């Protein structure tokens, strides 16, 4: 009987120790996980102007970085008007309030001798970098795309397209 009682006490101590250790380490893992957990937010934007349409411009934010870009640009006019273009530039801007405007992504294609094959180069590039304090700001931002191009007749044109969440 004494042997049975001592074994029971020993088993009870081992079980309580295992449960205590499990709860202790589980608490630490949960606390560490909660502190190290990445936030991840993806937003898509689209817009249309008189000559151009943009679909699926993406902004991907994490705790430590932000990536912008990867949209699809479509020319809405007659493609023969731009097939021999030698200049194309796109610029994405972010606005917070009236005076706080920031250029966040820009691309340029140009050629001195011939065309730039604009119809084959309508994909928007992307950029990634560390997240800045202004990017962490919860104040709503508005976005717009500015496009400049030269048509087949050598006329430089410019269009601004407001972007909306899609």
Image (tube, rainbow, N blue to C red):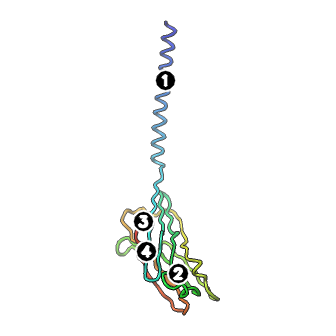
Task: For marks 2 and 4, give the one nearer the viewer.
Answer: 4
What residue would you read off at disc 2? 89
- Marker disc for residue 47: 4
Which of the two labelled residues, at mark 4 and mark 3, occupies the earlier sequence position? 4
Which of the two labelled residues, at mark 1 and mark 4, occupies the earlier sequence position? 1
SS type, badge 1: helix
> Looking at the image, is 153 positioned above or below residue 49?
below
Which of the two labelled residues, at mark 1 and mark 2, occupies the earlier sequence position? 1
SS type, badge 4: strand
SS type, badge 3: helix
Distance in Å between CA atoms under marks 3 and 2: 25 Å
Q: Residue at x 55, y 73 (%)?
A: 123
Query: Which image quarter holds the C terminus?
Result: bottom left
Q: Residue 94 in the image: state x and y as whole percent.
A: 43, 72
Task: For marks 3 and 1, give the one nearer the viewer.
Answer: 1
Name which quarter of the figure residue 138 lies in. bottom left
Distance in Å between CA atoms under marks 1 and 4: 63 Å
- Marker disc for residue 15: 1
Mark 2: give few (<14), some (14-19) or many (20+) Cα within 10 Å: some
SS type, badge 2: strand
Q: Residue 15 in the image: state x and y as whole percent.
A: 49, 23
């Amino acid at each position: 009987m004494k042997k049975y009682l001592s074994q029971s006490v020993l088993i009870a101590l081992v079980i309580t120790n295992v449960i205590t250790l499990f709860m202790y380490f589980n608490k630490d893992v949960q606390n560490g996980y909660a502190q190290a957990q990445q936030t991840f937010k993806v937003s898509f934007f689209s817009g249309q102007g008189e000559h151009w349409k943009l679909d699926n411009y993406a902004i991907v934010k994490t705790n430590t970085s932000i990536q912008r870009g990867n949209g699809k640009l479509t020319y809405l006019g007659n493609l023969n008007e731009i097939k021999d273009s030698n200049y194309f530039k796109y610029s994405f801007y972010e606005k917070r309030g009236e005076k706080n405007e920031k250029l966040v992504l820009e691309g340029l294609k140009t050629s001195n001798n011939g065309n730039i094959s604009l119809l084959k180069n309508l994909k928007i590039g992307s950029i990634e970098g560390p997240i800045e304090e202004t990017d962490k700001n919860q104040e709503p931002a508005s976005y717009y795309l500015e496009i400049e191009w030269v048509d087949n007749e050598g006329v430089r044109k410019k269009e601004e397209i407001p972007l909306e969440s899609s």
